[in-house]
Amino acid sequence: MTRKIITALLNLILRIFFRRVEVAGLERVPKDKPVIFVLNHPNGLVDPLFILCFAPRPVSLLGKSTLFKMPLIGWLARALDTLPVYRQQDKGEDVSRNRETFQKCRELLERGGSLALFPEGVSHSEPSLRPLKTGAARIALGAASSGMEKDLMTVPAGLYYTAKARFRSAALL
């Protein structure tokens, strides 16, 4: 119930900020198979909102562990079933804890759930993709090794903003 209320509120916020939001390709998203959504990351904390609000099924996200230390963002991340990623560039984070995260990802996918992540690892304003991290491939290979190779779908998705920081601009997922 909490998730539905939060995503409805976030959807309203997105619809107010962006004059037009277009979502394409929903018919390609399986409704009953495990899914990994991989997206580009051009707009920081806004990008995850699009997949949370507009995917045709509930989605869990991977997010940097430091987000969980922020009072409001951390609460939202936990309420929306976000899984922490422990990155080397974040001081004081134990990257060995990613084993737990990968295990939770496998369990989620084994239950037929869906997961979204941003393999660039950082948000940026460059016109092209940054080098991709290996997390998505590692999660998919881990799931395949546990017998899901025929069911698991990887769905690439792109986010495009006409002017990401301008009020009443447009967005495409």
Image (cartoon, grey):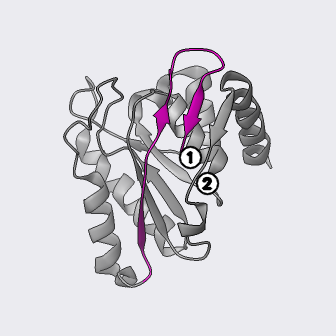
Question: Which three-letter amino acid code belongs to the residue tagged 1?
Answer: Ile
* Foreground residue among 91 and 155: 155
Check whether the beta carbons of the residues at disc 1 and disc 2 lie within 8 A of each other.
Answer: yes
* Magenta-drawn stretch contains 159: yes
Question: Which three-letter amino acid code belongs to the residue tagged 2?
Answer: Ala
Residue ID at (32%, 31%): 122
Residue receiving disc 1: 51
In the image, taking residue 13 as reference, residue 161 lies left or right, namely: left
Residue ID at (74%, 24%): 16
Which quadrant would residue 152 be assigned to in this image?
bottom left
**Range shown magenta:** 151-173
Distance from label 1 to label 2 (Cα)? 5 Å
Q: Position of residue 99 (x, y in %)?
A: 29, 55
Q: Position of residue 135 (x, y in %)?
A: 28, 52
Residue receiving disc 2: 55
Q: Work out which residue is located at the far top of the displayed protein and give it.
A: 166
Q: Position of residue 13 (x, y in %)?
A: 72, 27
User: Badge 1: how crowded within 10 Å, few (<14), some, or many (20+)?
Assistant: many
Residue ID at (21%, 33%): 88
Tell me, for residue 74, which label it has, or none.
Answer: none
Residue ID at (68%, 22%): 17
User: Badge 2: how crowded within 10 Å, few (<14), some, or many (20+)?
Assistant: some
